[in-house]
Amino acid sequence: MPESPTPAPHDRDHGAELQTKLASLRAILREMGSVLVAYSGGLDSAFVLAMAQQELGERAVGLTAISPSLPERERRDATRIASELGARHELVESREIHDPRYAENPDNRCFHCKSELYRITARRSRELGLEHVANGTNLDDLGDYRPGLDAATEASVRSPLLEAGLHKDEVRALAQQLGLSFWDKPAAACLSSRIPYGTGVTPERLSQVERLEDALLSLGLRQVRVRHHGELARIEVPREDLARAFDAREAILEAGRAQGFTFVTLDLAGYKSGSLNQLLPVLQ
């Protein structure tokens, strides 16, 4: 039997660094004593919940805020993953869409959304007798415009991944090493992020986006974003999937028109997280 290749020195060094960061994350969670995790079901918050459950058991609880901006597929995933982890999990209604400061969709919309979320988590953590609230923020989140981080700071929410110095790809690598089923879950974001700043966030627009994204996922596209530009749907997929999406253009066009869009386009730049933030200099 051929011998396994010896890892290169830089691979060994990075592997050791990852394990050091994981140990740091576990220590941070143990130090917390008890925690309510603001848990969307995405990779980062799911990893925090997984590690918190392992370190704290019943003293770790995941809370998912339910509102029209959360796709039903993400709610189902959050429930499934928490069940797999054996973690306590609660679903609580969030009413940010009733706040005009959010619904008008200003460039700091996310601040008002997260402020509502952290009011909910603060209240529930007190009711459950949990000492801390934590989120899934990692180092890469600091490199984009994210007003929700200000809301976390104001609410004294902890960010264990950030405190342990973990990047997104490192979280994914650790989740894979630990055999967690969600390690390769595509990045997710609330449906409101599909609507350009200044265009009102309404349940109807959110539902329109969600239904079209579900239709596109059913065509075999694993990661999609439907950017809502009124009569036009601008569809983003990873660059490596552009050819596949183009081949399915007739089905995509039919799906878009079925959801009320007159024009359906494929963005040749490919998927980019937070792509609508490119408009911020113009707005400001």
Image (cartoon, rainbow, N blue to C red):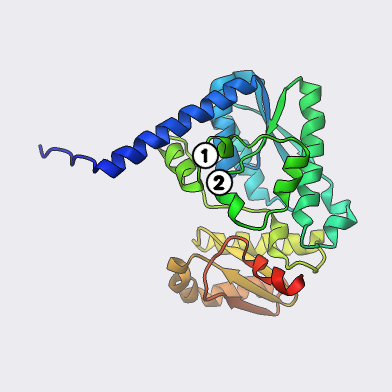
Q: Which corner quadrant holds the N terminus?
A: top left
Q: Are marks 1 and 2 in contact (CB under 8 Å)?
A: yes
Residue type at numbered disc 1: Gly
Q: Secondary structure at mark 1?
A: loop
Q: Residue 283, position in %: x, y?
A: 76, 72
Residue neighbourhood size for the residue with mark 2, other residues' Cα within 10 Å, grouped as few (<14), some (14–19), many (≥20): some
Relative placement, left or right, of 175 versus 111 is left
Mark 1 vs 2, N-terminal side: 2
Residue that appears at 53% across and 59% down:
223
Residue that appears at 80% across and 68% down:
198
Q: Residue 253, position in %: x, y?
A: 60, 76
- Would you identify the image quadrant in which residue 179 lies? top left
Relative placement, left or right, of 22 versus 133 is left
- Give the residue pinned by disc 1: 165
Residue neighbourhood size for the residue with mark 1, other residues' Cα within 10 Å, grouped as few (<14), some (14–19), many (≥20): some
| Picture layout, residue 157 above or below residue 74 | above
| Picture layout, residue 254 above or below residue 174 | below
Q: Residue 258, position in %: x, y?
A: 68, 71
- Give the residue pinned by disc 2: 139
- Would you identify the image quadrant in which residue 36 lies? top right
Residue that appears at 59% across and 19% down:
57
Separation of residues labelled 1 and 2 (CA atoms): 7 Å
Give 130 or 31, whichever is nearer the viewer: 31
Res 264 visible: yes
Residue type at numbered disc 2: Leu
| Picture layout, residue 267 above or below residue 139 | below
Res 66 visible: no
